[in-house]
Image (spheres, helix red, strand yellow):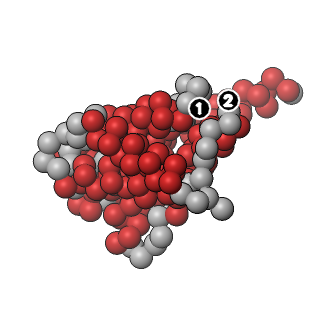
Amino acid sequence: MGVHTDAVTERTGGRSARIRAAALGALAELLDEQPADAITTSEVARRSEVNRTTLHRRWGGMPGLLADLAVEELNVHSPLPEDAGDLRTELRQWAERVITALNRHQAGRSPFVAALLRAVQDGHAPGELLQGRLDVLDQMLARAAERGEQVRLTAYDLVEIVLLPIYAARLLAPEPLAPELADRLVDRFLTLNASSPGT
Protein backbone atom coordinates (compact mmCIF):
# COMPACT_ATOMS: atom_id res chain seq x y z
CA MET A 1 0.00 0.00 0.00
CA GLY A 2 2.82 2.38 0.92
CA VAL A 3 4.54 1.76 -2.40
CA HIS A 4 1.33 2.51 -4.28
CA THR A 5 0.83 5.80 -2.40
CA ASP A 6 4.39 6.91 -3.08
CA ALA A 7 4.01 6.05 -6.76
CA VAL A 8 0.82 8.07 -7.04
CA THR A 9 2.46 11.02 -5.28
CA GLU A 10 5.46 10.83 -7.57
CA ARG A 11 3.32 10.68 -10.69
CA THR A 12 1.18 13.60 -9.51
CA GLY A 13 4.21 15.70 -8.62
CA GLY A 14 5.92 14.78 -11.86
CA ARG A 15 2.90 15.73 -13.95
CA SER A 16 2.51 19.00 -12.07
CA ALA A 17 6.17 19.84 -12.62
CA ARG A 18 5.91 19.00 -16.33
CA ILE A 19 2.85 21.23 -16.73
CA ARG A 20 4.63 24.10 -14.98
CA ALA A 21 7.78 23.65 -17.05
CA ALA A 22 5.81 23.52 -20.30
CA ALA A 23 3.71 26.58 -19.47
CA LEU A 24 6.60 28.71 -18.23
CA GLY A 25 8.81 27.61 -21.11
CA ALA A 26 6.15 28.61 -23.61
CA LEU A 27 5.64 31.95 -21.91
CA ALA A 28 9.39 32.64 -21.94
CA GLU A 29 9.50 31.96 -25.68
CA LEU A 30 6.52 34.23 -26.30
CA LEU A 31 8.11 37.03 -24.26
CA ASP A 32 11.12 36.90 -26.56
CA GLU A 33 8.80 37.37 -29.54
CA GLN A 34 6.31 40.00 -28.41
CA PRO A 35 5.45 42.39 -25.55
CA ALA A 36 3.88 40.86 -22.46
CA ASP A 37 0.64 42.80 -22.83
CA ALA A 38 0.09 41.18 -26.23
CA ILE A 39 0.33 37.61 -24.87
CA THR A 40 -2.82 35.72 -23.92
CA THR A 41 -3.43 32.49 -22.05
CA SER A 42 -4.75 31.04 -25.30
CA GLU A 43 -1.33 31.58 -26.93
CA VAL A 44 0.44 30.05 -23.94
CA ALA A 45 -1.94 27.07 -24.08
CA ARG A 46 -1.27 26.49 -27.79
CA ARG A 47 2.49 26.82 -27.44
CA SER A 48 2.77 24.69 -24.30
CA GLU A 49 0.04 22.17 -25.17
CA VAL A 50 -1.40 22.75 -21.70
CA ASN A 51 -5.16 23.17 -21.53
CA ARG A 52 -6.20 26.81 -21.10
CA THR A 53 -8.55 25.79 -18.29
CA THR A 54 -5.58 24.30 -16.45
CA LEU A 55 -3.63 27.54 -16.86
CA HIS A 56 -6.47 29.56 -15.35
CA ARG A 57 -7.10 27.07 -12.57
CA ARG A 58 -3.44 26.96 -11.55
CA TRP A 59 -2.26 30.51 -12.24
CA GLY A 60 -5.46 32.55 -12.45
CA GLY A 61 -4.44 34.07 -15.79
CA MET A 62 -1.54 36.01 -17.28
CA PRO A 63 -0.55 37.99 -14.14
CA GLY A 64 -0.04 34.75 -12.22
CA LEU A 65 1.88 33.13 -15.06
CA LEU A 66 4.16 36.14 -15.44
CA ALA A 67 4.76 36.29 -11.69
CA ASP A 68 5.66 32.59 -11.52
CA LEU A 69 8.07 32.91 -14.46
CA ALA A 70 9.63 36.01 -12.91
CA VAL A 71 10.25 34.30 -9.58
CA GLU A 72 11.65 31.22 -11.33
CA GLU A 73 14.12 33.32 -13.31
CA LEU A 74 15.17 35.29 -10.25
CA ASN A 75 15.77 32.10 -8.28
CA VAL A 76 17.83 30.57 -11.09
CA HIS A 77 19.83 33.56 -12.32
CA SER A 78 20.21 35.90 -9.33
CA PRO A 79 20.07 33.85 -6.13
CA LEU A 80 21.67 34.85 -2.85
CA PRO A 81 25.46 34.81 -3.36
CA GLU A 82 27.60 32.44 -1.34
CA ASP A 83 29.33 33.92 1.71
CA ALA A 84 32.26 35.86 0.21
CA GLY A 85 33.50 37.29 3.50
CA ASP A 86 32.52 40.90 2.82
CA LEU A 87 29.36 42.72 1.85
CA ARG A 88 30.84 44.68 -1.06
CA THR A 89 31.85 41.52 -2.90
CA GLU A 90 28.50 39.85 -2.30
CA LEU A 91 26.52 42.89 -3.41
CA ARG A 92 28.55 43.19 -6.60
CA GLN A 93 28.10 39.49 -7.39
CA TRP A 94 24.37 39.79 -6.85
CA ALA A 95 23.98 43.02 -8.86
CA GLU A 96 26.04 41.60 -11.73
CA ARG A 97 23.82 38.51 -11.79
CA VAL A 98 20.73 40.71 -12.00
CA ILE A 99 22.26 42.62 -14.93
CA THR A 100 23.25 39.39 -16.68
CA ALA A 101 19.72 38.00 -16.23
CA LEU A 102 18.16 41.17 -17.65
CA ASN A 103 20.57 41.24 -20.58
CA ARG A 104 19.29 37.83 -21.66
CA HIS A 105 16.09 39.54 -22.82
CA GLN A 106 15.16 42.41 -25.07
CA ALA A 107 14.65 45.71 -23.26
CA GLY A 108 11.40 45.65 -21.31
CA ARG A 109 10.79 41.92 -21.86
CA SER A 110 12.33 40.50 -18.73
CA PRO A 111 9.74 38.33 -16.95
CA PHE A 112 10.24 40.33 -13.76
CA VAL A 113 9.73 43.67 -15.49
CA ALA A 114 6.76 42.26 -17.43
CA ALA A 115 5.19 40.93 -14.22
CA LEU A 116 5.67 44.25 -12.44
CA LEU A 117 4.14 46.22 -15.30
CA ARG A 118 1.21 43.81 -15.62
CA ALA A 119 0.50 44.00 -11.89
CA VAL A 120 0.47 47.80 -12.02
CA GLN A 121 -1.76 47.78 -15.12
CA ASP A 122 -4.20 45.49 -13.33
CA GLY A 123 -4.28 47.78 -10.30
CA HIS A 124 -2.39 45.43 -7.99
CA ALA A 125 0.67 46.14 -5.88
CA PRO A 126 3.48 43.83 -7.02
CA GLY A 127 4.25 42.99 -3.40
CA GLU A 128 4.82 39.28 -3.83
CA LEU A 129 7.54 39.74 -6.42
CA LEU A 130 9.33 42.41 -4.42
CA GLN A 131 8.89 40.50 -1.16
CA GLY A 132 10.84 37.60 -2.59
CA ARG A 133 13.71 39.93 -3.45
CA LEU A 134 13.51 41.61 -0.04
CA ASP A 135 13.78 38.25 1.73
CA VAL A 136 16.97 37.42 -0.21
CA LEU A 137 18.49 40.84 0.47
CA ASP A 138 17.59 40.67 4.16
CA GLN A 139 19.52 37.41 4.41
CA MET A 140 22.56 38.95 2.75
CA LEU A 141 22.53 42.02 5.00
CA ALA A 142 21.93 39.93 8.13
CA ARG A 143 24.87 37.71 7.23
CA ALA A 144 27.11 40.76 6.88
CA ALA A 145 25.98 42.07 10.27
CA GLU A 146 26.74 38.70 11.85
CA ARG A 147 30.29 38.99 10.48
CA GLY A 148 30.60 42.30 12.31
CA GLU A 149 30.19 44.57 9.28
CA GLN A 150 28.38 47.87 9.64
CA VAL A 151 24.87 47.51 8.25
CA ARG A 152 22.72 50.58 8.81
CA LEU A 153 20.55 50.58 5.68
CA THR A 154 17.83 48.04 4.99
CA ALA A 155 16.77 45.70 2.20
CA TYR A 156 14.23 48.35 1.14
CA ASP A 157 17.11 50.81 0.73
CA LEU A 158 19.01 48.25 -1.33
CA VAL A 159 16.03 47.81 -3.64
CA GLU A 160 15.70 51.58 -4.05
CA ILE A 161 19.40 52.31 -4.54
CA VAL A 162 20.58 49.27 -6.52
CA LEU A 163 17.82 47.00 -7.81
CA LEU A 164 15.25 49.42 -9.20
CA PRO A 165 17.82 51.58 -11.03
CA ILE A 166 19.10 48.44 -12.78
CA TYR A 167 15.60 47.52 -13.93
CA ALA A 168 14.84 51.09 -14.98
CA ALA A 169 18.09 51.29 -16.95
CA ARG A 170 17.38 48.03 -18.79
CA LEU A 171 13.82 49.11 -19.52
CA LEU A 172 15.07 52.30 -21.18
CA ALA A 173 18.39 51.20 -22.69
CA PRO A 174 18.41 49.92 -26.28
CA GLU A 175 21.66 48.04 -25.63
CA PRO A 176 22.57 45.49 -22.91
CA LEU A 177 23.71 47.00 -19.63
CA ALA A 178 27.41 47.14 -18.82
CA PRO A 179 28.60 45.22 -15.72
CA GLU A 180 30.22 48.44 -14.45
CA LEU A 181 26.73 49.68 -13.53
CA ALA A 182 26.75 47.17 -10.68
CA ASP A 183 29.94 48.68 -9.27
CA ARG A 184 28.57 52.24 -9.38
CA LEU A 185 25.29 51.37 -7.70
CA VAL A 186 26.85 49.16 -5.04
CA ASP A 187 29.41 51.86 -4.25
CA ARG A 188 26.56 54.37 -3.89
CA PHE A 189 24.72 52.05 -1.50
CA LEU A 190 27.82 51.44 0.62
CA THR A 191 28.65 55.16 0.77
CA LEU A 192 25.15 55.95 1.99
CA ASN A 193 25.29 53.02 4.39
CA ALA A 194 28.54 54.31 5.91
CA SER A 195 27.19 57.85 6.32
CA SER A 196 23.76 56.83 7.64
CA PRO A 197 23.10 57.50 11.33
CA GLY A 198 21.31 54.16 11.52
CA THR A 199 18.54 53.45 13.97
- The reply to whether discs 1 and 2 touch (Cβ–Cβ < 8 Å) is yes
On-image quarter of the C terminus: bottom right
Q: Residue at x 25, y 49 (%)?
A: 170
Residue 65 seen in render: no
- Disc 1 residue type (three-letter): Gly
Residue 119 drawn at (x, y percent): 41, 66
The single residue placed furthest to the bottom in the displayed view is: 123
Q: Is 102 on the left or on the right of 192, as rendered?
A: left
Per the image, label 1 sits on a secondary structure element best described as helix
Q: Quadrant of residue 8?
A: top right
Q: Residue at x 59, y 32 (%)?
A: 14
Q: Nearer the viewer, residue 72 or 64?
A: 72
* Pointer 1 local density, CA inside 10 Å: few below 14, some 14–19, many at least 20: few
The single residue placed furthest to the right in the displayed view is: 1
- Disc 2 residue type (three-letter): Glu
Q: Which of 81 and 148 is in front in this view?
A: 148
Q: Residue at x 25, y 52 (%)?
A: 169
Residue 196 seen in render: yes
In the rendered structure, find residue 40 and report the number of the disc placed on it: none
Q: Which of 9 and 75 is in front in this view?
A: 75
Per the image, label 2 sits on a secondary structure element best described as helix
Say above or below: 97 vs 186.
above
The residue where tag 2 is placed is 10
Q: Is 105 on the left or on the right of 192, as rendered?
A: left
Say above or below: 53 vs 22.
below
Q: Quadrant of residue 1?
A: top right
Q: Is 131 on the left or on the right of 119, as rendered?
A: right
The single residue placed furthest to the left in the displayed view is: 174
Q: Residue at x 40, y 39 (%)?
A: 95
The residue where tag 1 is placed is 14
